[in-house]
Amino acid sequence: MRAGWSKLGLRGRLALSIAAIVTGAFAIVFVAVRAEMAHESRVIEREEARGPGGPSSSEREAGEGAAASPIAEAQSDAEKALVVAGGAALAAALLAGYLLAARTASPLRRFAATAAKVDAGDLSPRLEASPGSATELRVLAEAFNGMLDRLDSAFARQRQFVSDASHELRSPLTAIRGQLEVLARCEAPSAVEVRRVEAIAMTEMGRVERLVEDLLALAQLDEGVGLSLRRVPAGPFLRGLAEAPPDGTELGEMAGGSIEVDPDLIAQVVRNLLANARRHAGPNGRVVLSSEGNGNDLVISVEDNGPGIPAAERERVFDRFHRSEPARDRASGGSGLGLAIARSIVELHGGRIWIEGSPIGGARVSFALPRGGNRERSLT
């Protein structure tokens, strides 16, 4: 029986369930009505026996069969009527249950067909719920479509990321291969030529190493790397980063107090921002590191007097491999991942990062960190 029930679809299950409910209700009503009719029959007989001028006992016994006949017939007719009405109600219940189940199951069958297409790798289909659909179906369709939109967007970003990473790796490898082929064509290359090719190859290999390190860092951050939180004094911590080579970073106003952070990761953010500011400011430009308190947050800023970043580009520069000036950034050794890594680290600490214009003429990159650390962090 269980095997047969498990093979039934939603329409069959609903139809049988409604029929069972109607049958049970009819059986209860039938038994109750029949019992009530039997009780009324007995009451009538007693009243007739007690009434004045009623027949004698011998007459009652002689006419008992004839007297009971009309009541029995009425009871039988009522039972037949109930059976006919019950059968009609059961047939109507089966039909109504099947139609209701078919109407209910129809959108679910469409949803299942759409889910099968998605499972096959096609993320373009979407669930369509008519305005007259039940609220639960509309909520299910909206949630499912939202999930598909996020998956489609995530896969698109992944494809773009793989394409960009392949392009970034292909460029230095092509340059190295070209130089080696030029060197191989020389039967007796001079020491100067060997050193020239070596310098170019080492430069390009350095780019590859930095790119691979950045990709590994992003992969770890995407996996939700645990934070090794420590409370550090904000001022001395930032001054130490500014004084590290290469020199040339100016110190602005420094807020006091301490912050609870992962020092290695936050140091990586500050170093990325300082290196990026130095590239844009040029060898004779200014780079300023400062911090200030903002309620429960500490806001750390790095600014330069370079060309700045247009307002339309300020959010996009945090995208992976995004470059506002591709040729110059690639030549200077930038991978286009520094700001993406910085944003991931800051958000992992429960903070935020943004870009605005700098009073000294270029761009200011600022990020805010909760002084008490990220309340929703995962600890190592």
Image: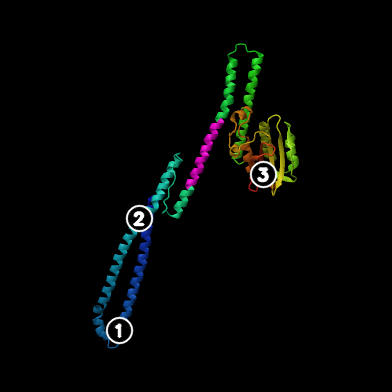
Q: Secondary structure at mark 3?
A: strand
Judged by depth in the image, the label closer to the viewer, 1 or 2, is 2
The answer to whether residue 95 is visible is: yes
Q: Residue at x 29, y 88 (%)?
A: 52
Residue 7 pos. (x, y %): 38, 50
Q: Which residue is mark 2?
A: 99
Which residue sits at x=66%, y=32%? 280
Please say whether residue 146 is one of the residues in the magenta stretch.
yes
| Mark identifier at residue 131 | none
Dominant SS type (magenta): helix
Disc with the residue nearer the chain's start (1 vs 2): 1
Q: CA distance from mark 1 to mark 2?
A: 55 Å
Q: Position of residue 306 (x, y in %)?
A: 67, 33
Residue at left 30%, top 65%?
85
Disc on the earlier residue, 2 or 3 = 2
Question: What is the magenta range?
Answer: 144-165
Q: Which residue is mark 3?
A: 368
Above-or-below relation of 20 to 363:
below
Indicate yes or no whether the magenta region holds residue 184: no
Question: Which residue is the site of mark 1?
Answer: 49
Query: On the picture, is 68 further left or further right than 28?
Result: left
